[in-house]
Image (cartoon, helix red, strand yellow):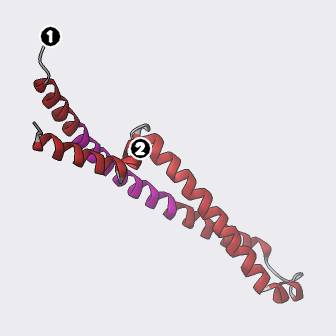
Amino acid sequence: MLNNKKIRMMTKLAVYENKEGKEDIHLSKYYKTDYVRYQVLKSAISATIGYILILVLTFLYKSEYIIQNAVSLDYKTIGIYILGIYIMVITIYGLGSVVIFSLKYDASRKKLTRYFKLLKRLHKIYSDETPES
């Protein structure tokens, strides 16, 4: 005879595994600090590439002015200004990444905890159904 409770539980588990569970199960392979550090590193690299692209585009846009005033420009001040903005951008991206990915990891752990509880209940149902030898 069909056990409706078991079928519902198996359906919930299958839906979770096929949708958001894939990513949650993948995240469970990492420690929280390792996952967050990896994501912060990716964010810092992406922010650096984006910042460099913005600098190149700005240079190209202002190239006529830069070429005309190449001798009279204060390169030290410009360098300090560019470096200061870069440090602020990296700091903001880094802190934002730490917060966002820590919350994401914690939420993933909570969902996985519920998933494993359902798995244990399903295993108990299976062990209760099978006759002991």
Which SS class for mark 2? Answer: helix
Q: Identify the amino acid type marked 1.
A: Ser
For marks 2 and 1, give the CA distance: 39 Å
Q: Is residue 93 above or below residue 118?
A: below
- Nearer the camera: disc 2 or disc 1: 1
Total marks shown come to: 2
| Residue at image coords 30%, 49% | 16
Which SS class for mark 1? Answer: loop
Q: Is residue 29 above or below residue 70?
A: above
Residue 57 in the figure: left or right of residue 99: right
Query: Which is more toward the observer, 130 or 78?
Result: 130
The verdict on residue 122 being magenta is no
Query: Which is more toward the observer, 126 or 71?
Result: 126
Q: Which mark is residue 27?
A: 2
Q: Identify the amino acid type marked 2.
A: Leu
Query: Which is more toward the observer, 36 or 108?
Result: 108
Q: Are discs 2 and 1 less than 8 Å apart at CB?
A: no
Q: Is residue 79 above or below residue 43?
A: below
Residue 117 in the figure: left or right of residue 66: left
x and y, in percent, of residue 115 in the image: 25, 42
Stretch in magenta: 93-116
Q: Which mark is residue 133?
A: 1
The verdict on residue 115 being magenta is yes
